[in-house]
């Protein structure tokens, strides 16, 4: 999915290494192996406190207690408890591709996507991203509220502008500005939360795999599982529920729906579930895909 928040900032990637002269001078069939070796070396030298595994480590079992790694592209993979498998975590934001790779065991993950590096233990980058997004939101709101216009009666607050102003134009500009701030804040929060929430992680993967790639799974304000659906995805999910009534005997109307929308643009639908309901929806999506 769209790389709106990178957990791997400053972490060397295969894409970067493939452009180095030391790699490009090699015959084409040798470049990937050389690029992987170079990325492994760079990561171990630049981040000695983080463990990095290469393809040859696929013969060994996954390290005990490891819950997430960043692959050679910088994408996040999370372990699926009790299964011995790993699943790529979709990035928050609009999808650029349909679906994600299926679950892989540790050896397959390293063979295909090594080197793999553990993320920072304290997840400091995610917290910094959230704080930065919060600060930006506060600045943008303050700017909008205290912004002024100049009229015949002097300078007035944007909130006090009279009916002669271009109200719709001003409202649309506010909506656009606030939407950008909200999207950035959601992306930062989702990236931080999804690492520690198995229900949300699995549901996010299932949404992406089932083609509902414009939707986002997250925790709601009261701890519920919240799925924000685009209009197209809402229709697709309703169809899936209808054809899978024996597995998930509910419709969007039965699970609590509220419409969310700004001043302009298409409305989205937010569907809220309990954790059990989120797990059931994940099963429905997996079953529909199969």
Image (cartoon, grey):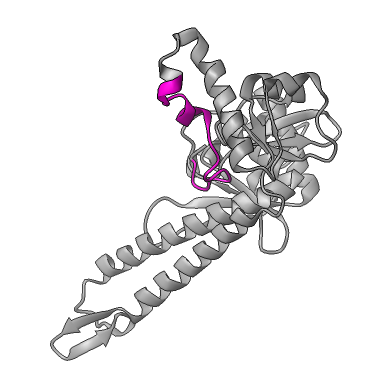
Q: Position of residue 261 (x, y in %)?
A: 46, 58
| Magenta span main SS | loop
Q: Is residue 73 above or below residue 256?
A: above
Find residue 84 and report its horizontal and vertical position in percent.
82, 28
Q: Is residue 5 magenta?
A: yes
Q: Is residue 166 magenta?
A: no
Among the 4 quarters of the image, the one containing residue 155: bottom left
Determine whether, in the image, residue 80 is placed left or right of residue 116: right
Query: What stretch of residues is rendered in magenta?
Result: 3-22
**What residue do we see at 36% from left, 75% from top?**
143
Which of 120/278 is in front? 120
Q: Residue at x 50, y 51 (%)?
A: 268
Would you place residue 284 above or below residue 8 in this image? above
Which corner quadrant of the image does residue 284 belong to? top right
80 or 282, which is in the foreground? 80
Work out whether residue 175 or residue 192 is closer to the camera in this orientation and state it.
192
User: 146 or 262: nearer the eye?
Assistant: 146
Task: Determine which quarter of the picture holds residue 83.
Answer: top right
Residue 64's x, y, as percent?
A: 85, 36
């Amino acid at each position: 999915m769209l790389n709106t928040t990178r957990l791997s900032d400053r972490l060397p990637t295969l894409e970067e290494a493939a452009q180095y002269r030391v790699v490009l001078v090699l015959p084409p069939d040798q470049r990937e192996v050389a690029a992987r070796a170079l990325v492994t070396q760079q990561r171990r030298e630049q981040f000695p406190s983080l463990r990095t595994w290469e393809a040859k480590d696929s013969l060994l079992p996954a390290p005990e207690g490891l819950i997430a790694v960043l692959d050679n592209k910088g994408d996040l993979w999370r372990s699926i408890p009790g299964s011995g498998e790993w699943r790529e975590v979709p990035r928050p934001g609009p999808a650029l591709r349909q679906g994600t790779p299926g679950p892989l065991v540790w050896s397959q993950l390293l063979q295909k996507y090594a080197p793999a590096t553990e993320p920072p233990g304290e997840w400091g980058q995610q917290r910094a991203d959230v704080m930065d997004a919060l600060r930006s939101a506060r600045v943008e709101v303050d700017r909008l509220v205290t912004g002024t216009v100049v009229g015949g009666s002097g300078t007035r607050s944007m909130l006090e502008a009279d009916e002669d102003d271009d109200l719709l134009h001003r409202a649309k500009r506010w909506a656009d500005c606030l939407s950008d701030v909200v999207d950035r804040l959601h992306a930062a929060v989702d990236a931080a939360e999804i690492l520690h929430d198995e229900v949300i992680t699995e549901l996010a993967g299932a949404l992406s795999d089932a083609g509902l790639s414009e939707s986002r799974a997250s925790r709601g304000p009261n701890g519920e599982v919240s799925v924000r659906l685009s209009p197209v995805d809402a229709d697709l999910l309703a169809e899936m529920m209808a054809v899978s009534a024996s597995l998930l005997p509910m419709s969007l109307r039965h699970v609590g729906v509220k419409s969310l929308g700004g001043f302009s643009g298409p409305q989205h639908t937010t569907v809220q579930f309990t954790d059990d309901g989120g797990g059931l929806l994940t099963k429905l999506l997996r079953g529909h895909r199969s």
